Image: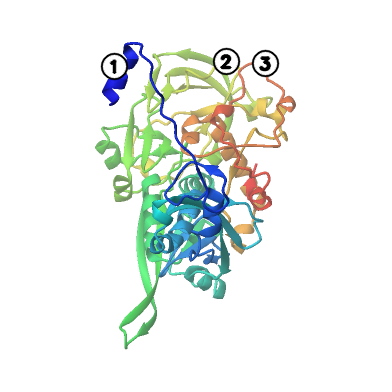
Amino acid sequence: MFGSSGMAEEAGMFKVHQTIGSVLCCKCGIPMQPNAANMCVKCLRSEVDITEGLLKRLVLVHCPECESYLQPPRSWVKLQLESKELLTFCLKKLQKNLNSNKVRLVHAEFIWTEPHSKRVKVRVKVQKEVLNGAILEQSYPVEYVQQEHMCDSCTRVQANPDQWVAAVQLRQHVSHRRTFFYLEQLILKHGAAASAIRIKQMEQGIDFFFSNRSHGVKFVEFIGKVAPVKSRHDKQLVSHDPKSNNYNYKYTFSVELSPICREDLICLPPKVAVSLGNIGPIVICTKVTNSIALLDPFTLRHCFLDADQYWRTSFKSLLTSRQLVEYIVLDVEVVSSEVTIGGTKYRLADAQVARVSDFGKNDTIFNVKTHLGHLLNPGDYALGYDLYGANSNDMELDKYRGLVLPEAVLIKKSYEEKRQKKRGKPRAWKLKSLEMEVDDKARVDQDKMVSEYEQFLKDLEENPDMRFNISLYRNAEYQPSEMASVTDGDELPSVPLEELLADLDLSEDEDGEDNMME
């Protein structure tokens, strides 16, 4: 039939179009398209309620401390309000009831409720086959009541905050905390301490407390991937049940960070220098990850020392960043082409420098070789180590007989004079910080800590490699008009705006604002 009508249409013949007939509803008598029940939609809904027997009120067990929900029988999952995960979690509780009533779920969405109402409402749209095969679709609200009940870990913490199972003690035996400032940002970015129940700042490190041994082991593994460390662990018996043969232990992980830090001046032990291809022996540390990057500033030879190699023959720095001296550059003569080592550019040069502290006192001038030939120009300032006036009692240095030490070793260009003009003005970015308690011994010198933190922020501005692994957030208090541009000489190093993250409404969260350090 369809073939003949198509032929007739092609031939230009008259074609009779089919029309859909209408019938009268058997209840109200209005015209309608015929269906299996011979009733209009309104009458069909008045006769049949497909939501009859479906659950419309359920209970969600919610932990008010960690914002997690109970997933029977004993597991807890963290879910945000009005998230896709929470909607899936709610519908799973409803699915068994829908299946038993032979109802098919079509659509679901949240209905807005007050955040403190302890209610989660979901509008659910379902379909079901009714009279004589007719399919009816209907929406109805489902109310989930939040029943507050603390999870096991939060219960233990509330009952006794010191009831931890695993403690990780991070220590570094140096006179500053710059390593921990950087490590704190790495921990925040990767969420490594998200399961810690308490964090405490100690005199030479930080203590992390966990409610589970596996969380402590995972945290120690993370630290080992970002820093050269050595660790040991111990356990102490807390209780023992002879009937069930259950033992409860407290585990302690002692993690020691390498005392070698970025910008430190090092005198390598003879055995280490030979194993690294007779580099140095006077080298500087340019980068610290899970290995230590060393550079000979007089030849531009470089090498990497992993954690196992370092701890096998551990050594300390000859001079640290706290002993840097400011020099003024009088003359620079480049002696080699520019080379790139580990993403950083270097160029050998002969420089003539003088200590800034000597101005007006004497005419002492030093002729040194430096790896900063690509940065320094006459009139610039640089920070370096004064070996001419230093009194070092290093055992490794005494092993090299006849070694002639340079009078000075330049480490980096100094922008302190330009920063004086912008002192006290806010930066365009800020960092988050861990919520931690402070031990009484660690409160001794707050001025020193503020100064070290400010130096850490300056290092982030000057070193893009350090910024690569951490998250920087936009500062809402920053006003571009306040920051006057530097017109004389080089621009001050700063963080480009495209590297900054949105601060995730941190300015609207009072608690989050208190944890920010500018």
In the picture of the structure, the residue carrying the numbered disc 1 is: 7
Q: Distance between the residues labelled 1 and 2?
A: 95 Å
Of discs 3 and 2, which sits in the foreground? 3
Secondary-structure class at tag 3: loop
| Above-or-below relation of 351 to 149 | above
Q: How far apart are marks 3 and 2 (CA)?
A: 14 Å
Q: Where, by quadrant of the figure, is residue 439 drawn?
A: bottom right
In the picture of the structure, the residue carrying the numbered disc 2 is: 378
Q: Nearer the viewer, residue 477 or 206?
A: 477
| Quarter of the figure that contains the N terminus | top left
| Residue at x 71%, y 33% (from the top left corner) | 423
Any part of residue 308 in sight: yes
| Above-or-below relation of 274 to 25 | above
| Above-or-below relation of 313 to 118 | above
Q: Which of marks 1 and 3 precedes in the sequence?
A: 1
Location of residue 187 in the rendering, given as x and y in whole percent from the top left corner:
48, 49
| Quarter of the figure that contains the C terminus | top right
The disc labelled 1 sits on which kind of residue?
A: Met
In the picture of the structure, the residue carrying the numbered disc 3 is: 488
Secondary-structure class at tag 1: helix
Location of residue 323 in the rendering, given as x and y in whole percent from the top left corner:
55, 39
The disc labelled 2 sits on which kind of residue?
A: Pro
Q: Are marks 1 and 2 in contact (CB under 8 Å)?
A: no
Task: Say which mark, if any, is on residue 196.
Answer: none
Q: Nearer the viewer, residue 130 or 53?
A: 130
The disc labelled 3 sits on which kind of residue?
A: Asp
The local crowd at label 2, few if under 14, some if 14 to 19, many if 20 or more residues have their Cα within 10 Å, is some
Any part of residue 123 in sight: no
Q: How far apart are marks 3 and 1 (CA)?
A: 88 Å
| Residue at x 44%, y 28% (from the top left corner) | 406
